[in-house]
Each structure stands twice: as C-alpha cells, then as structure tokens.
Image (cartoon, helix red, strand yellow):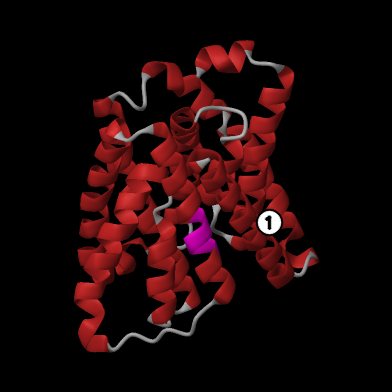
Amino acid sequence: VLAMTLDAEPWMLAAAAAALLAGGLAKGILGVGLPMIALPLLYTSIPIREAVALMYGPVLVMNVWQTFQGGYFATALKKYWPMMAAVAAGTWLGAKTLVGIDPKTLQIVVGATVILFSSVNLLQPKIVLPPQHTLWLSIVVGLVGGFFGGLTLFVGPTVIMFLVALRTPKDEFIGTVALVYLLGIIPTGLTYVAEGVLRAEHVVPTLIACVPVFVGMLIGQWIRGRVNEETFRKALLITLVVIGLNMVRQAAF
C-alpha cells in the first residue's frame, strides 16, 4: 500500500481520496456510514484487502473521537456489556475469516452486505423488541455485527437496527453506537496485525487516509443544517445499493 501511495497513477490517488472524502462527508452529515460508503468506493482503485487495511486508521480515529465526545461511555458499557463482549468475539472470527477468504468471495460478501444493510435502512421497517428477548438478541446482534466488522469493518448496521428497535434515546444511542464501534475495531486491528492483514507498510497510508476523511467529516458537519438530511440519506442509500450490486456482478460474472 505504501508503494501504491507513492507510485500510483494520479487518478488512483484522486479516486482513493474522493472515496475517503465521501465517507467522511456522510459521517459528518449522518453520524454513521464511513466504512460502508468508503470501502466499496475504494475498491474501484485498489484491491479489496488493501482497501480494508487502508480504512482501519480512519475508522479507529473517528470512533475514538466519537466515543468520548458524548459522555455516555460508562452508561453504555453498563447497559449493553453482553452485546459488547459478543462484538469483540465476533470481530475476532471475522478478522480470521478475512485472512483465508478468496478475494472474489470477499467482494461478493462486501457487496451483498452493502446491499442488505442499505436496503434495510432505506425501507426503515418498524421493529419493536419485547423486553424479555433483549438479552439473547443483543448477543446475537453483537456476534453478527462483530463478524462483519472483522471481515469488512461494517460493525454498526446490525447494532444500529437493534438500538432503533429498542427505541433508545438519541444521546444514549450515539454514545452506545460509538462505543460498539470502538470495542469492535480494537480487537479487529489486533487480529489484523497478528494475521498479517495490517502490516508496517500500512501505517503511513492509513494515517494519511485520516486526512480526507476528517476534512469530509468537517464539511459534512458544516452542511448538516443546510441540506435536507432525509433526502441526502435516501439518495446515499440508493447509490450504495447500486454500488453493491455492481460489486456482486463483477465478482460473480
């Protein structure tokens, strides 16, 4: 990745920077969606495993910042610790799977995941969970979210749907999602390092990648109150469905 960063064609660098900027922009406007938007866009210019490694730094930095911004760290940990533990276990399994999975299969998994989660968020089904089922469902949600987090860095979508179904208050929701992201991304990184997915040559590129993401996030925060957020969200999700379908098509055919 470092050689690619230094020697790549200008259009490849521009495409990668634009993908990272788009992910940061969406995160600034919506608060979520950084890896889900940036990763499939990055794949247009660099191999998918390298794209995952490149995304690690921005995802880690943004989630550390978000976790401690709202002051809900202790509350979220106390209330949802079974789900947090399941996320950590799931990320280990997902990261281990990333090492041995065929690149085309990985591309199909990433594309299908983007299609599934974007479609669910676009349709916004009204799900209400009975309190007596919350504990075991939280563990299942944590394992599934963690697995996809280890494989693709998409920790959040299942957790977001679960918390919405619980009608979690806004501030608690933001603090909990941020903590889940962080508790998922740290063990993912350790496993990536142990398995050779994230190596020394990735350090400089993944840190450089934080810059366009951070710029995009600042721009997104600035325009948040100046655009119709719901229209932007729907257009973004429809675009992601198309991107996911194209990824699956390329890998399958």
Find the residue positioned furthest to the right: 226
Boundaries of the magenta span? 114-118
Of residues 44 and 57, the one nearer the viewer is: 44
Asked if 132 appears above or below 5 in the picture, the reply is: below
Residue 182 shown in magenta: no
The residue that mark 1 highlights is 221
Hey, what amino acid is under mark 1?
Answer: Gln
Asked if 131 appears above or below 177 in the picture, the reply is: below
Residue 2 in sight: yes
Residue located at (80% from left, 65% from top): 226
Of residues 160 and 110, the one nearer the viewer is: 110
Of residues 239 and 164, the one nearer the viewer is: 239
> Dot 1 lies on which element?
helix
Q: Quadrant of residue 124?
A: bottom right
- Residue 87: horizontal and vertical position, in percent? 27, 56
- Residue 21: horizontal and vertical position, in percent? 67, 41
Residue located at (73% from left, 19% from top): 10
- Residue 219: horizontal and vertical position, in percent? 72, 49
Decide if residue 136 is on the left or right side of residue 51.
left
Decide if residue 17 is on the left or right side of residue 36.
right
